[in-house]
């Protein structure tokens, strides 16, 4: 009998959490952003993509804005951070947005990786109220 009570409480909590998330995260119908003409290049090879990303960062003269779902403190992640720090020291405005859950291990290792001058933000941190709703809605479209 206790197991049924626990299951019922869990279902009720998930439903209330979902409703709280819906109420909190209502999106406007129209986009507040202006439409822009831009180019996009699609990659099916991670090594080629990483080389292009590094080249783009090296050639940046004004700003670098990057958003990753997962950034790890492996060789590639450390190389990227070194490059971003180097560009920040050269006077380039560098902003890095990471997913708060997907990049949680990287967040812990930031103490050991130098990141002076790089503005690091974590999107969608875990919050108790509305957490079930927000965990299902991780599209990362908001970089400010």
Image: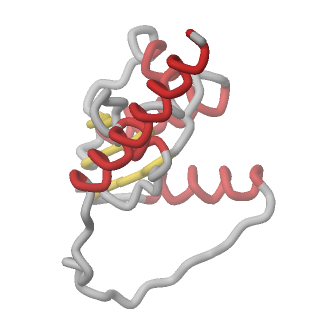
The answer to whether residue 94 of the structure is visible from this angle is: no
Identify the residue at image location x=75%, y=52%: 46
* Relative depth, front residue between 79 and 129: 129
Name above or below for residue 96 compared with residue 141.
Answer: above
Task: Residue 113: give x, y in percent of width and height.
Answer: 45, 16
Query: Which quarter of the figure has residue 1?
Result: top right
Q: Compared with residue 112, is residue 27 higher up or lower down, i.e. above or below?
A: below
Q: Give how far across and how far down residue 119 sits, in percent.
A: 26, 37
Residue reaching furthest front? 1
The quadrant where residue 28 appears: bottom left
Q: In this view, does 72 lie to the left or right of 35?
A: right
Q: Quick check: 144 left or right of 77?
A: left
Left or right: 101 as drawn, with respect to 23: right
Q: Quadrant of the C terminus?
A: bottom left
Can residue 16 be seen by looking at this rendering?
yes
Please name whichever residue, 71 or 2, is drawn nearer the observer in this view of the structure.
Answer: 2
**Residue 48, percent across and down?**
75, 57
Q: What's the residue at 52%, 44% (across, down)? A: 69
| Residue at 19% from the left image edge and 77% from the top image edge | 32
View extreme (right): residue? 45
Q: Position of residue 76 (x, y in %)?
A: 65, 33
43 left or right of 100 in image: right
Q: What residue sits 77% from the left and 50% below the top?
A: 47
């Amino acid at each position: 009998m206790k197991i049924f009570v626990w299951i019922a409480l869990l279902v009720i909590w998930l439903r209330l959490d979902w409703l709280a998330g819906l109420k909190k995260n209502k999106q406007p119908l129209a986009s507040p952003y202006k439409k822009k003409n831009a180019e996009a290049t699609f990659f099916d090879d991670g090594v080629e993509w990483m080389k292009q990303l590094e080249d783009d960062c090296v050639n940046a003269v004004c700003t670098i804005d990057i958003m990753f779902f997962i950034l790890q403190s492996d060789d590639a992640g450390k190389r990227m951070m070194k490059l971003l720090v180097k560009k920040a020291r050269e006077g380039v405005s560098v902003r890095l947005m990471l997913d708060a859950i997907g990049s949680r291990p990287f967040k812990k290792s930031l103490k050991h990786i130098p990141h002076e001058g790089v503005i690091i933000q974590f999107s969608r941190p875990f919050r108790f109220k509305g957490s079930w709703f927000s965990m299902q809605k991780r599209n990362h479209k908001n970089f400010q």
